Amino acid sequence: MVMPYRFNFDLSNISKSLFKEVAKVAAQREMHRKLGKSARELANKLKIQEATGLNVSDALTLIEDLVDIQVKNMSEREKFQKAGKKVLFLPHCARKYMDNRCKAQFSQDIPSYICARCSPDCQINKATQLAKKKHYDVYVLPGNSCVEKIIKNNRYEGVLGVACTEELRIGGEYLKRIGVTGQALSLIKNGCANTKFNLDNLNALM
């Protein structure tokens, strides 16, 4: 899998309100797609560089992508809430273990990992249980390429995806082409293993 960023980030310790504030300020000032002084002002106002440890250029890239996700979620929110059959796509890299300690089995036919609920504190396990209670179908994917195959084999009206921002962007473009509404949740820690997402934020999007 190709990393969408050339840098790593970990937003685990940042206040959840930051993401809403980023979207609010950027949308009001139309900053997030502008270069130069305005974007730097946004980064300085929200102290992104200090919070993430990233240099300004990388921090601005991250801001831009997070704002896009937040704005698109808001624009699709009402339609998503009214949608019928829904699905949750989770990234396999967020499993607690990436070796044989994880008992999830991979099904080539679906294609998806099937969570075995082997670790009570695994975020994939927790997210799967939460989604099942809300009548979502759940797939734990090795990559974005699996999404199209799964959606083609089912008639989902709403799609909720957790992934790196680049994969969320690609997935969002696909959903737009086929006329399916969606919501997206970005990872708060990227990488190819031990990635993280916020379970409370996921619950709020469902």
Image: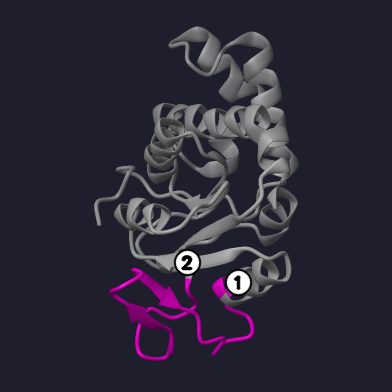
Amino acid identity at mark 1: Thr
Q: Quadrant of the N terminus?
A: bottom left
Rendered residue at 63%/32% (across/down) = 76
Q: Is residue 101 magenta?
A: yes
* Circle nearer the N terminus (2, 1): 1
Rendered residue at 39%/59% (across/down) = 153
202 vs 56, left or right, is right
Observer-nearest residue: 41 or 75?
75
177 vs 81, left or right, is left
Residue 158 vertical position relative to residue 34 in the rendered view, above or below: below
Q: Which residues are magenta?
A: 95-124
Rendered residue at 47%/11% (across/down) = 34
Residue that mark 1 sits on: 128
Q: Secondary structure at mark 1?
A: helix
Local packing at callout 2 (Cα closer than 10 Å; few below 14, some 14-19, many 20+) is many
Rendered residue at 43%/30% (across/down) = 61
Quadrant housing residue 70: top right
Residue that mark 2 sits on: 139
85 vs 56, left or right, is right
Residue 167 marker: none
The dominant secondary structure in magenta is loop
